[in-house]
Image: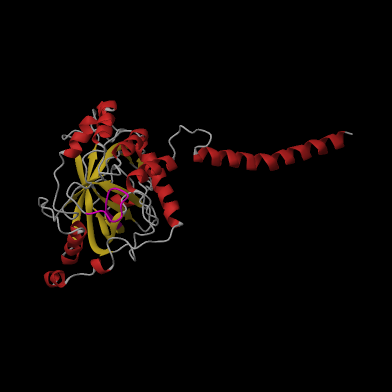
């Protein structure tokens, strides 16, 4: 009788195991999709907010949709190696694949001075401890939390009749989020350079450098151009003038930036990217980025890459900044969606990236 009881108990446990695993998998799926918590901000809700302003453009990134691939290398000088054990910050050269883009989900938008420009990079050392980053030419992020970013996208999406954000809706957002006014004012006052090549790109989010002994240092970083910075003049008659200019620039001569690492001071906000840091903070020149190649996303090396800012090497960790987690989740969701869509011809075509006779003459 005892034996039969044990056999029966074992059968029940196996049966429970069979039905429990699918049940918990189903619950996990429903939780991730937001079905069990309809008021929780999900990946899908974040991308839906972005698409309200840009519409659906299958095959393109949901943000930074208009872009071009670049390639080159990063040469670390070892100056930051005492703060981080990351391979890319030691002395030596590692290959780089990257991308210049304009913020927003419109793949055929016209270039304009006020558009936010971005640089995305994938640094690939031989030990596979790669470092990916998505950095932008604004001084601070406009908001401090994922929910605020979601609400800002809804407030700023263009009106169907005017094609511009509704002033009343934007004013209501500013009134209900008065603590964000300084960040938005800083962004509005930012100096604008002549193009991608002479612009400065900032991490905005904070990270932690981890030394060999485990010491953690909060940092932000920026790619600062070696090229002279020229003022923006605009080209009203050229829909793609920013991209044409960087294509011409890179075919004429290598483009370079210094990786400037800023160490957090005692009064700096580590986990809020809408707060600027002190101008007196210590900075370290950690190495030089050199870009020598450029190509359309029709055939370029950056097309299949998601520049997730949480792809970090050993020696660099995310801070507690909640925007970082939201960016990573949105990037992965965007990549998943576009990977199943038919590719569409980008605005920056392969023909546009061929060097002109003028560029060939300058290079020679």
On screen, residue 169 versus residue 47, left or right, reads: left
Q: Residue at x 23, y 47 (%)?
A: 116
List the single residue furthest toward the right.
1
Residue 263, visible in the rendered structure:
yes
- What percent of the width, then of the height, locates residue 96? 30, 58
Q: Residue at x 39, y 59 (%)?
A: 304
Q: Residue at x 22, y 54 (%)?
A: 110
Q: Nearer the viewer, residue 81 or 332?
A: 332
Q: How is the image coloured?
A: secondary structure
On screen, residue 361 versus residue 4, left or right, reads: left
On screen, residue 215 versus residue 357, left or right, reads: right
Q: Quadrant of the N terminus?
A: top right
The picture quadrant where one finds residue 45 is top left
Start-end of magenta stretch? 98-110
Q: Nearer the viewer, residue 154 or 223?
A: 154
Q: Magenta-highlighted stretch: main secondary structure?
A: loop
Q: Quadrant of the C terminus?
A: bottom left
Q: Is residue 307 magenta?
A: no
- What percent of the width, then of the height, locates residue 200? 19, 48
Q: How many marks?
A: 0
Q: Nearer the viewer, residue 241 or 20?
A: 241
Q: Nearer the viewer, residue 357 or 176?
A: 176
- What percent of the width, then of the height, locates residue 41? 43, 35
The picture quadrant where one finds residue 111 is bottom left
Q: Is residue 107 magenta?
A: yes
- What percent of the width, then of the height, locates residue 121? 30, 53
Vertical order, 238 against 214 (above or below): below
Residue 315, visible in the rendered structure:
no
């Amino acid at each position: 009788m005892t034996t039969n009881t044990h056999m029966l108990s074992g059968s029940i446990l196996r049966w429970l195991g069979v039905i429990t695993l699918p049940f918990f998998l189903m619950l996990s799926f429903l939780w991730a999709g937001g079905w069990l918590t309809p008021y929780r901000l999900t990946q899908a809700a974040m991308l839906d907010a972005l698409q309200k302003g840009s519409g659906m453009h299958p095959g393109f990134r949901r943000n930074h949709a208009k872009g071009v691939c670049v390639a080159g290398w990063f040469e670390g000088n070892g100056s930051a190696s005492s703060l981080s054990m990351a391979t890319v910050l030691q002395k030596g050269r590692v290959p780089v694949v990257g991308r210049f883009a304009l913020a927003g989900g419109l793949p055929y938008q016209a270039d304009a001075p006020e558009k936010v420009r971005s640089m995305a990079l994938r640094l690939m050392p031989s030990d596979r401890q790669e470092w990916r980053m998505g950095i932008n030419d604004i001084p601070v992020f406009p908001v401090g939390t994922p929910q605020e970013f979601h609400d800002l996208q809804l407030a700023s999406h263009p009106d169907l009749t005017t094609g511009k954000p509704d002033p009343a809706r934007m004013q209501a957002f500013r009134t209900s989020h008065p603590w964000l006014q300084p960040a938005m004012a800083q962004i509005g006052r930012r100096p604008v350079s002549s193009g991608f090549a002479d612009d400065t790109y900032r991490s905005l989010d904070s990270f932690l450098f981890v030394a060999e002994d485990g010491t953690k240092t909060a940092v932000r970083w920026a790619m600062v151009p070696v090229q002279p910075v020229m003022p923006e003049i605009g080209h009203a008659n050229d829909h793609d003038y920013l991209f044409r200019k960087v294509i011409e620039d890179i075919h004429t001569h290598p483009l370079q930036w210094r990786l400037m690492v800023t160490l957090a001071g005692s009064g700096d906000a580590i986990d809020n990217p809408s707060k600027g840091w002190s101008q007196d903070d210590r900075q370290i020149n950690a190495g030089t980025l050199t870009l020598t190649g450029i190509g359309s996303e029709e055939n370029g090396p950056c097309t299949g890459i998601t520049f997730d800012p949480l792809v970090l090497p050993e020696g660099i960790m995310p801070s507690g900044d909640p925007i970082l987690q939201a960016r990573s989740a949105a990037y992965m969701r965007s990549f998943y969606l576009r990977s199943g869509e038919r590719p569409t011809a980008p605005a920056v075509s392969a023909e546009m990236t061929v060097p002109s006779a003028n560029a060939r003459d300058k290079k020679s």
